[in-house]
Amino acid sequence: MKLFSTNDKTNIVDLRTAVLKSLPADKGLYMPLHIPELDKRFIENIDSYSFVEIAFIVSSTLLGEYIPPSDLYSIVSKAINFPAPVKSITTNISTLELFHGPSLAFKDFGARYMAELMSYFTKKGESKITILVATSGDTGGAVAAGFYDTPGIDVLILYPSGRVSALQEKQLTTLGKNISACEVNGSFDDCQALVKEAFLDHELNKKYNLSSANSINIARLIPQSFYYFEAFKQLKNKSNVVFCVPSGNFGNLTAGLFSKKMGLPVQRFIAATNKNDVVPRYLETGTYSPLESVSTISNAMDVGAPSNFSRILELYKSDWASIKKDIVGFSFTDEETKRAMQHVYKNHNYICDPHGAVGFLAAEEFLKSNNGKQVVFLETAHPSKFLDVVEPCLETKVEVPARLASLANKTKKAEVLSPAFDDFKSYLLNR
């Protein structure tokens, strides 16, 4: 598998380099030189494959012969060892539950696959790696769980102070060992900017072998494509399928577009956002105008400058008309999100987290002018991760899974930093 930088198509590297270095020096993002199509017989017979088999076939098709099949199957089977069930909500709307992994969020798929892949590469002689990761909520918890106690890898998680839920924060700050956290007095975009600047700083790169576990790393996107195939497999009606993706940094939607390019028969994708609506506005106007992110109850989507947008542009050669043909966008307020949570609970006896509720709203809005489509919205996190929002909104208690409840009484440990890069650099140099 060969990859190029979105800022310089002549900058071509192999998978190992792209995964371990995360970002090219020219500030672009790595993209596959070629996205191959799957054998049509695989799609036709997809019902006969297990989730692990689907993940292996998709992964091996993308990676080619770069990793021996037996090693790749071991990586996939260790990473993808929990389900992704589809649940029906209405006649035309279903949800794909992606919160059955260890951190109760969809990012478990990407984090665990990346951890296995990096561990495989470091065993081949790579020196110790320090992973820097910015999180708006769920990424940090998934990365912490996925990389916890992994030999040869240290993880430093940056998160915006006051903008993640209490239990999300405990997932980032209580593990110890090779997992550390920085609480940044700023937004997610500030955290992401610190990570990106660190990768380009000569002094830091001299001291550390830096990598990233954000969706800027291609190793996050590859496994996120797996569950689109798994969801399609579970649908009884496989015609007129549309996926609705609650979106922040747009890695999840980009992975869905990868699956479509590989041959998954998806008619369209819906980009569902909260008030951080930079991509829906682009889809409407053709103008991309990043803004300062605003805080919402669907905090994992509070991103004003989504990194993966450049990958979407690359996939479509910046052709706005082609992008609009495959993607439609909607955005919603916190009040609309709360009303949707109440509606789904009252009428369908299903508890959405705030992000899933945004997805449900977008699915409903899309169906108003697209009758007969089958919409699957992604439920990206377990509602217990947002008790302070969900319980008052629904006026009911939400059961907290034991693996999350056990964190409540653990002691938070985090370094508090300003959003200034000089402060972050000084902290890293003096660790």
Image: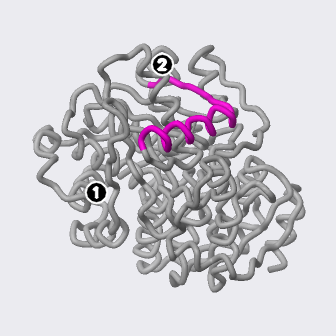
Magenta includes 227?
Answer: no
Estimate the x, y position of residue 418 in percent, counting from the top left.
Answer: 89, 60
Q: Residue at x 63, y 44 (%)?
A: 301
Q: Residue at x 66, y 24 (%)?
A: 288
Q: Amino acid at mark 2?
A: Lys
CA neighbours of label 1 inside 10 A, class few (<14), some (14 to 19), many (20+): many
For label 1, the SS is helix
Q: Which residue is mark 2?
A: 324
Disc nearer the start of the sequence (2/1) = 1
Q: Which residue is mark 1?
A: 55
Q: Is residue 301 above or below residue 330?
A: below
What span is colored magenta in the figure? 327-348
Apparent side of residue 263 relative to residue 311 in the rendered image (left or right): left
For label 2, the SS is helix
Q: Residue at x 56, y 67 (%)?
A: 143
Colour scheme: one colour
Comparing 43 with 48, the one in front is 48
Q: Is residue 22 above or below residue 150?
A: above
Q: Is residue 167 visible?
A: yes
Apparent side of residue 404 relative to residue 416 in the rendered image (left or right): left
